[in-house]
Image: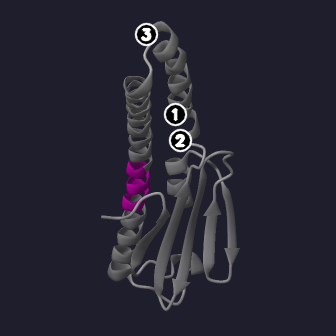
């Protein structure tokens, strides 16, 4: 399970355990991710948190710069004033803002696809383990690592997107 998470986020992260809670946390400077597995009553609930707070900043800087550059062009070069000048400046701002928002959306969609792939990988691990336990069954000499921890897997998400 840890290998799947590390491959998905391309980060070795930090693993910690407390009683029936297993947690992986990313070490990245900009991207923050946390995967928590809570084992209770023979079921495992996996919570996934992902955030990249600095994602939008570099993409929205051109909006500000482009709008500032449009001011002297509008007033000095074109000689526009009043409502036509304001309309041009607002249209430049909205166009640049829409392009930046589209770029952020594309980058976020890639991250969501990566997290959905992680979800599929974790579900596959859970179903393989449950199938193996059904076929073989736990025995008295089964090591603790092979006990049926993955009877049920529920994914919950926070922050950046919601599950459809």
Residue toward you, 122 or 98: 98
> Which residue does the numbered mark 2 point to in the structure image?
56
Quarter residue 124 falls in: bottom left
Q: Which mark is residue 78?
A: 3
Q: Is residue 105 left or right of residue 53?
A: left
Quarter containing the C terminus:
bottom left
Give the Cα separation between the discs numbered 2 and 3.
32 Å
Vertical placement of residue 110 versus 75, above or below: below
Residue toward you, 37 or 49: 49
Judge the density around disc 2: few (<14), some (14-19), many (≥20) Cα neighbours within 10 Å.
some
Which segment is the magenta one?
Answer: 112-120
Give the Cα separation between the discs numbered 1 and 3.
28 Å
Residue toward you, 3 or 22: 22
Report x, y in % for residue 127: 35, 71
Residue drawn at (40%, 43%), measured in percent from left and top? 105
Residue drawn at (66%, 54%), measured in percent from left and top? 13
> Which residue does the numbered mark 1 point to in the structure image?
59
Q: Secondary structure at mark 1?
A: helix
Residue drawn at (45%, 85%), measured in percent from left and top? 138
Report x, y in % for residue 21: 62, 78
């Amino acid at each position: 399970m840890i290998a799947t998470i590390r491959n998905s986020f391309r980060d070795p992260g930090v693993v910690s355990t407390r009683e029936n809670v297993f947690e992986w946390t990313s070490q990245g400077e900009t991207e923050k991710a946390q995967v928590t597995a809570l084992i209770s009553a023979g079921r495992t609930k996996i919570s996934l948190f992902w955030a990249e707070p600095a994602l939008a900043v570099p993409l929205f800087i051109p909006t500000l710069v482009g709008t500032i550059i449009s001011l002297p062009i509008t007033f000095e070069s074109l000689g526009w004033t009043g409502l036509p000048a304001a309309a041009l400046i607002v249209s430049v701002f909205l166009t640049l803002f829409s392009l930046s928002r589209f770029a952020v959306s594309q980058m976020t969609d890639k991250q969501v696809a990566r997290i959905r792939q992680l979800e599929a990988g974790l579900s596959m691990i859970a179903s393989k383990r449950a199938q193996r336990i059904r076929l073989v069954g736990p025995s008295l000499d089964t090591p603790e690592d092979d006990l049926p921890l993955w009877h049920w897997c529920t994914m919950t998400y926070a922050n950046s997107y919601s599950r459809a």
